[in-house]
Image (tube, rainbow, N blue to C red):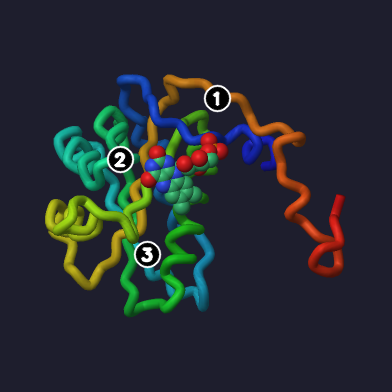
Amino acid sequence: MLEILMRRRSIRVFEDRKVQGDMIDGLVKSALLAPTSKNNRPWKFIVVEDQAILEKLAEAKPHGATFLKNAPLGIVVLADPAKSDVWVEDTSIATILVQMAAEAMGLGSCWIQIRERQHSNEMSAEEYIQKLMDIPSSIKVEAIIAIGHPKETKKPISDEELQFEKVYRDQYGKFYK
Ligand SMILES: Cc1cc2nc3c(=O)[nH]c(=O)nc-3n(C[C@H](O)[C@H](O)[C@H](O)COP(=O)(O)O)c2cc1C
């Protein structure tokens, strides 16, 4: 597990080939296995392989989503806030679990932030996606996970890069290392 965590980097360039159905099933399972506060499971997910929809999702915000148009797979992470007051945490945990499962399968992925982001001055990225995908306005849009076979390599994080100075032992300010 630690090896997978150290290897995972955000991948934004993907090979031009589909992700196999059984791999997608595994990714969906990873999302649904995510722990949630009070086991409320407030999330919902939209698995997107349709290239035309991925291209439109890539325009959800002006920066930081454009690479999605060249990804074979996107998973839109939604939540029903009526089901949980901590849906942000619940959706975030599910999102990172999908990213870790993708890494373990040899796939690359990147989190695309939607919540609190703007599509334009007039419209939030969330509203843009709600309109595009027929999502009711009561359902929140947290993120999109871009996934595919990686076409870029990034070096794993080394121990030296880890910010151990942010870790304390027993009390604040008493360094762990
Ligand atoms: C909450 C969150 C939001 C992010 N939003 C975006 C995004 O909108 N677009 C993007 O390209 N990367 C996004 N990222 C990826 C980060 O830029 C990336 O994780 C960070 O720079 C560290 O790089 P690494 O993942 O390769 O270790 C996001 C990551 C997180 C955790």
Q: Is residue 155 left or right of residue 43?
A: right
Q: Amino acid at mark 3?
A: Trp
Residue beneath label 1, please?
A: 154
Q: Secondary structure at mark 2?
A: loop
Inter-mark Cα distance, 2 to 3: 25 Å
Q: Secondary structure at mark 1?
A: loop
Who's the residue at 29% across and 65% down the image? 140
Which marked residue is nearer to the observer: mark 2 or mark 1?
A: 2
Whether residue 101 is visible, yes or no, is no
Q: Earlier in the sequence, mark 2 or mark 1?
A: 2
Q: Is residue 3 left or right of residue 170?
A: left
Inter-mark Cα distance, 2 to 1: 21 Å
In what quadrant of the picture does the N terminus appear? top right
Who's the residue at 52% across and 21% down the image? 153
User: 10 Å neighbourhood of mark 1: few (<14), some, or many (≥20)?
Assistant: few
Residue beneath label 2, please?
A: 63
Could you say where residue 99 lies in the image, as x and y percent from the top left?
49, 43
Q: Does the closest atom of ligand 1 sit within 8 Å of the Cβ of label 1?
A: yes
Q: Which is nearer the eye, 41 or 14? A: 14
Q: Amino acid at mark 1?
A: Lys
50 up-or-down from 128: above or below: above
Inter-mark Cα distance, 3 to 1: 31 Å
